């Protein structure tokens, strides 16, 4: 290949994770960095998240999405960290050769010393839900509607039903209402919402929008444009109950039914993925099972708050520099196992005796429980919690001493009464 | 403007006939009631080129299927349409063995090449994912797959490149005899005058035939529901897997598509409403159950979309192709209609020449070749870079799942037959057909269509008519 470049650290994605990783790598002394961003500016999905609530942890103030992104973009620009916009990465090989394309350079390849995957996530589409009925215009994922409203300045609906109470759905319920649409209901299949408690309060309750738990959309009506949906209550096995079918007239159905880490490139690099998170399995440095390839942000697992994305990306950025400097990143190999009630942990393994914050999500709502971490029979952590829920990511820190004292090769995480 | 020949219906049959006739020095017109071609049964069927063992021997279906299947490799090559001879298998449990043998015998009599019965062990060696309880199967080496709307778009495009005219949103309301020909009037008042009418109106061919006074048959819609699985599953079977057929059709098949997805379906339910393309819980349940009979452990959690198509089932059980007083009627072109389409076109051409006095000469300028719609994807890195250097829009990816560039979308809007709605762009480029199903790219596609067609953003639709996507500007933009 004639136009093969060599770059120490290539970061795939210029959203919050990619920018934060780049800044951290720069601050750790690395200069030969390149961010590849597919969109026309840095910032990723934050660009269309014009609501506030970002940065409370990181900056101790309430920022909008674009403001939060801008804080990092300024740093990227001030530090002169190179980036290419409108550039799509098409392939990554296990040998860390990246193929990308844009209008100026055409198709080109880069041999990377290390790679940080920061591609983010995408929304689960309608097709995956097997909703019956017609296929008219007016069915959008909440994020697509958000792009139309916030980026393009157009209203894709007037009378709206939202399926799924993920955060984007909740935010869009408020956004559409503010723009003059009537949001008739938010239906949630589960008996609890997957969104943040503060969003339910500020986006639904404050506007009198009903949240219908244990409800789903069973049929879409309308030939050209949506004319209505039929909803129904579901039983404990999440099957619709026929007698509870109810027709709601609307012209729009928005879907907020889950986010999926976007790992096509990770797969092309033959990096193993966790079937639960949909992202790579990583150690505490966010290094995947391929040496020198790291992952952070929503491509690794879907986060609730961008603040934690930035934090995770800094870990990956620093570790990538250490890897390039030839520093040993491993010594131990301790697997983190879960009991099912704890659905997953990130990281999934620990390779060094240092303080490690472990993030995890639970499978259901549990009250008055203890979060227990065991090394065989030996209990390392036994932490009381009043309530844990799938919508809120939990974390706990394992100290270097605890890890040094681990005798087995597995630490098991469980929820107990 | 008076046309020599006017074809009603731009599905794959109308499109292939238009392409066949466009080689002659004729004024040729193609009328379509929708905002795009390929909008009826053509966009929602099994995408199979059948080998030809199904239809009753001696029937038009049998004759045209076998002929069409033989013509398909050349036709698809000329039109730059993806075609893959992936072979097909009709699988059977032990108690259905006699039926498989009967189909084998019929296939031989229909003239299908290479048929043989494979036993259990060979079947599992050929297709490791089939249900291990199956006993045997009929293997048809000439079974193939093709993308039906791609074929239709390419055929219409080629016809237009050779001078045919396409009128979209032309919903025929009446057909009157005048001056030894016909005047066809649309719902919106537009009219065309023509010497010969060819009725290719699919499920509506009966209604059109009534307008020409030639309806001695009926056509009713039979609903077929399908599911499409992610490309991850595109290799789940290599061949198209049918079950032994029933009188309602060839049953639920499992097949890879030429684009690398896995297709399951169709169900078969006779309905009344010719516009009802909804999917049903019963349909999904039937697909899950019946496809599992043939292929074990299908990853149903990888479904990316589902859809319904309507087959035009005619009252005679065979294809109806006939002419009277300058009107050619094609009706009941259900399966194997796609497989037969090239042969149907040839058949109609001969009918026009031999029985209806068409004697126009072949145009010197006629070119049967159309550049593939997906040519950009198949280029080498160097060739792509040449194009990007000339037109930077080919360097900008719009659809990330399928890797479709702005250049390709612009081309789909302008090249015959040009797309003017989001679904039209999708069928031509695959933009929006990947696993995110248009979540990221559809707003950009709307923007490109609006720009290229000089339309207002809110006037861009999903598939024409009232399928609007955006209603108005937001408050701050007004």
Image (cartoon, rainbow, N blue to C red):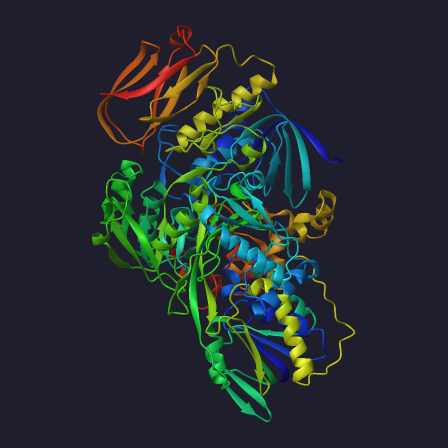
How far across and how far down the image is residue B299, in percent?
45, 41
Q: Position of residue B328 (x, y in %)?
A: 58, 80
Nearer to us in this view, A301 or B104: B104
Residue lying farthest to the bottom in this orientation: B179
Q: Nearer the viewer, residue B63 or B258?
A: B63
User: To which quarter of the image does residue A386 belong?
Assistant: top left
Q: Which quadrant of the figure contains the C terminus of chain A? A: top left
Residue B124 horizontal/vertical position (percent)? 54, 39
Q: Is residue B27 visible?
A: no
**Measuring 60% from the left and 22% from the top, which residue is drawn there?**
A30
Q: Is residue A154 above or below residue A118?
A: below
Q: Can residue A45 be seen in this snapshot?
A: yes
Give the x, y percent position of residue B194.
Answer: 60, 85
The residue at the point 41 percent across, 31 percent down is A276
User: What is the residue that sits farthest to the right in this orientation?
Assistant: B364
Image quarter in which the N terminus of chain A is found: top right
Q: For this view, does B112 lie left or right of residue A172?
A: right
Q: Is residue A63 above or below residue B104?
A: above
- In the image, is residue A299 above or below residue B279? above
User: Which residue is at a point 41% across and 60% down the rendered structure image?
Assistant: A136
Q: Where on the picture, by quarter, is residue B163?
A: bottom right
For the residue pair B295 and A334, the one nearer the viewer reads as B295
Q: Is residue B300 left or right of residue B383?
A: left
Tally of marks: 0
């Amino acid at each position: 290949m004639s136009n093969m470049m060599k770059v120490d650290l290539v970061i795939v994605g210029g959203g919050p994770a990619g920018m934060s990783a780049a800044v951290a790598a720069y601050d750790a002394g690395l200069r030969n960095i390149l961010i590849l961003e597919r969109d026309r500016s840095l910032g990723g999905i934050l660009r269309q998240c014009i609501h506030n609530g970002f940065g409370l942890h990181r900056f101790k103030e309430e920022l909008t999405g674009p403001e939060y992104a801008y804080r990092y973009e300024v740093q990227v620009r001030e530090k002169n960290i190179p980036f290419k916009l409108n550039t799509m990465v098409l392939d990554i090989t296990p040998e860390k050769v990246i193929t990308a394309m844009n209008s100026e350079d055409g198709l080109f390849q880069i041999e990377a010393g290390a790679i940080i995957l920061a591609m983010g996530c995408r929304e689960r589409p309608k097709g995956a839900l097997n909703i019956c009925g017609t296929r008219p215009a007016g069915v959008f994922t909440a994020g697509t509607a958000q792009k139309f409203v916030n980026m393009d300045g157009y209203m894709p609906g007037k009378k709206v039903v939202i399926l799924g109470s993920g955060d984007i759905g909740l935010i869009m319920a408020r956004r559409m209402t503010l723009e003059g649409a009537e949001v008739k209901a938010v239906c949630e299949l589960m008996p609890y919402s997957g969104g943040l408690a503060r969003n339910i309060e500020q986006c639904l309750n404050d506007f009198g929008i009903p949240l219908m738990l244990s409800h789903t959309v069973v049929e879409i009506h309308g030939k050209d444009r949506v004319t209505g949906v039929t909803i129904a209550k579901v039983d404990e096995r999440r099957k619709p109950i026929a007698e509870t079918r109810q027709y709601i007239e609307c012209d729009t159905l928005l879907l907020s039914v889950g986010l999926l880490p976007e790992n096509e490139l990770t797969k092309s690099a033959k990096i193993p993925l966790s079937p639960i998170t949909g992202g790579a399995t990583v150690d505490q440095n966010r290094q995947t099972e391929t040496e020198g390839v790291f992952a952070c942000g929503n491509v690794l697992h879907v986060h609730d708050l961008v603040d934690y994305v930035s934090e995770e990306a800094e870990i990956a950025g620093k570790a990538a520099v250490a890897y390039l400097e030839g520093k040993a990143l491993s010594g131990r190999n301790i697997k983190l196992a879960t009991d099912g009630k704890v659905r997953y942990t990130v990281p999934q393994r620990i390779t060094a005796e240092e303080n490690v914050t472990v993030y995890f999500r639970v499978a259901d709502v549990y009250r008055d429980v203890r979060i227990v971490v065991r090394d065989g029979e030996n209990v390392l952590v036994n932490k009381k919690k009043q309530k844990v829920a799938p919508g809120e990511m939990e974390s706990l820190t394992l100290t270097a001493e605890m890890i040094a004292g681990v005798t087995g090769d597995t630490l098991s995480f469980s929820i107990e009464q | 403007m008076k046309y020599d020949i006017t074809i009603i219906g731009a599905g794959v049959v109308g499109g292939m006939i238009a392409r066949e006739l466009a080689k002659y020095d004729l004024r040729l017109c193609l009328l379509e009631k929708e905002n795009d071609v390929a909008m009826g049964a053509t966009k929602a069927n099994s995408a199979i080129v059948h080998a030809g063992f199904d239809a009753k021997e001696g029937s038009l279906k049998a004759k045209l299927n076998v002929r069409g299947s033989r013509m398909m490799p050349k036709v698809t090559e000329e039109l730059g349409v993806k075609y893959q001879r992936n072979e097909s298998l009709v699988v059977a449990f032990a108690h259905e063995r006699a039926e498989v043998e009967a189909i084998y015998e019929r296939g031989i009599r229909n003239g299908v090449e290479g048929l043989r019965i494979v036993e259990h062990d060979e079947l599992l060696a050929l297709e490791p994912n089939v249900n291990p309880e199956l006993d045997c199967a009929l293997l048809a080496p000439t079974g193939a797959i093709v993308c039906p709307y791609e074929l239709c778009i390419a055929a219409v495009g080629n016809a237009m490149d050779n001078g045919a005219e396409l009128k979209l949103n032309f919903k025929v309301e009446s057909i009157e005899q005048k001056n030894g020909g016909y005047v066809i009037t649309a719902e919106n008042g537009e009219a065309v005058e023509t010497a010969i009418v060819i009725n290719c109106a699919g499920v509506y061919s009966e209604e059109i035939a009534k307008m020409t006074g030639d309806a001695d048959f009926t056509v009713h819609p039979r609903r077929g529901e399908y599911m499409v699985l992610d490309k991850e599953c595109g290799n789940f079977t290599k061949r198209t897997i049918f079950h032994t057929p029933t009188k309602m059709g060839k049953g639920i098949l499992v097949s890879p598509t030429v684009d690398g997805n896995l297709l399951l379906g169709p169900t078969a339910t006779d309905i009344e409403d010719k516009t009802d393309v909804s999917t049903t819980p019963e349909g999904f349940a039937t697909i899950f159950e019946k496809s599992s009979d043939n292929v074990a452990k299908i990853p149903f959690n990888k479904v990316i979309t589902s859809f319904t198509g309507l087959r035009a089932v005619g009252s005679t059980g065979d294809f109806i192709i006939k002419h009277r007083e300058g009107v050619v009627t094609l009706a009941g072109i259900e399966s194997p209609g796609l497989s037969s389409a090239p042969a149907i076109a040839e058949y109609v051409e001969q009918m026009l020449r031999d029985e209806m006095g068409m004697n126009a000469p072949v145009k010197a300028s006629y070119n049967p070749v159309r550049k593939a719609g997906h040519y950009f994807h198949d280029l080498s890195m160097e060739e792509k870079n040449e194009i990007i250097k000339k037109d930077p829009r080919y360097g900008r990816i719009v659809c990330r799942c399928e890797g479709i560039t702005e250049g390709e979308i612009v081309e789909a809007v302008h090249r015959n037959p040009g797309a003017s709605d989001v679904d039209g762009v999708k069928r031509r480029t695959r933009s929006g057909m990947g696993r995110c199903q248009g979540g990221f790219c559809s707003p950009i596609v709307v923007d490109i269509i609006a720009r290229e067609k000089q339309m207002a953003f809110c006037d861009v639709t999903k598939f024409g008519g009232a399928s609007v996507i955006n209603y108005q500007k937001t408050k701050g933009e007004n």
